[in-house]
Image: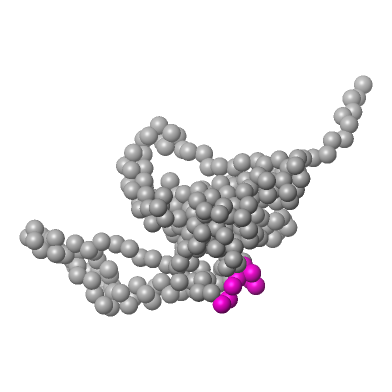
Amino acid sequence: MRRFIPFLPKPTLVPVIRLGGTIGTGTRSLNDEALTPLIEKAFKLKPAAVALLVNSPGGSAVQSSLIAARIRRLAEEKKVPVHAFVEDVAASGGYWLACAADDIWVDESSLVGSIGVIFASFGFPELMARQGVERRVITAGRSKSFADPFLPQKPEDIDRLKALQTPIHQAFIDHVRRSRGIRLDDSADLFNADIWTGQQSVDLGLTDGVAHMTPKLKELYGDKVKLVPLGRKRSLFQRFGLSLVDETLGAVEDRALWARYGL
């Protein structure tokens, strides 16, 4: 005899994608390759919405763009709203990711912004001269030793770097303007890489309000909304510490980015 199960309404699902850490191509970093399975899984669940939990000081502009574009593309294809919730920081590339959402919510003490582009390195020519070290470089191509940290800084290298940064900065600005639209305070200087606290960012139109994820999603989708956390799994090598050198170097780079925001 066949047994019939009474109809049960499906729970309201909101997958939560954690976007925590620096953005780049390393195994420790947020990047499009690593996040693609999580992002696609989130939208395949037929959710009421997708939530992004953002805590990032930034990193690669290209990876930021790829991740954000993938989220927007699926959101529009599936007609699913996306909500971003900022923890400590959504700065530079971290804010780029937050702008993939339809709205952005912050804590009062969150740090938001840094809409700019940076190139940072070290210079060692005087140290090398004191130590009697001679730099020998042979290139085919005038720009092959461009911005060499072992040579004195050249005005033409600075000009070239600024010429490279300008279109990247403009792409970032365009992304923010498309995302935030008329919510932005056009009377403010928003694109000079300044950072703001949570409520300041709301006042400037960079974010939409002060709210934490769980209560806000319950407010939007009801008390019975089911949050489904989605996070990256560590590789076997990472679990057993077999990529020690890569992990150590990556940790130093990550620490330098976080330190800019006192974290």
Residue found at the very far top of the displayed protein:
1
Q: Position of residue 240 (x, y in %)?
A: 40, 32
Query: Residue 19, image x and y in percent?
Result: 53, 50
Q: Nearer the viewer, residue 222 or 34?
A: 222
Give residue 121's quadrant in the image.
bottom left
Seen from the viewer's position, the closer of residues 189 and 68 is: 189
* Residue shown at 26% from the left, 77% from the top: 155
Question: Where is 168 relative to 77, above or below?
Answer: below
Give the image quarter of residue 158: bottom left
Residue 147 against residue 73 in the figure, above or below: below
Image position of 7 with respect to 76: above or below: above
* Relative side of 69 to 46, left or right: left
Regarding residue 70, the answer to whether it shows in the image is no
Residue drawn at x 70%, y 56% as measured from the top left: 81
Using residue 195 as the reference point, say whether residue 44 is left or right of it. Answer: right
Give left or right: position of 143 versus 25.
left
Count numbered badges in the picture. 0
Q: Residue at x 36, y 46 (%)?
A: 251
Question: On the image, which quarter does residue 199 sit in?
Answer: bottom right
Instruction: Look at the image and say whether residue 212 sits in the magenta stretch.
Output: no
Q: Of all residues shown, which one is farthest toward the right?
A: 1
Q: Looking at the rendering, in which quadrant would you find the N terminus?
A: top right
Q: Which residues are magenta?
A: 180-187
Question: Looking at the picture, how far across and down is residue 232, in whole percent?
Answer: 53, 42
x 34%, y 39%: residue: 244
Give residue 68's position: percent from left, percent from top.
57, 59
Inspect this view and state whether residue 192 appears. Answer: yes
Identify the colour scheme used: one colour
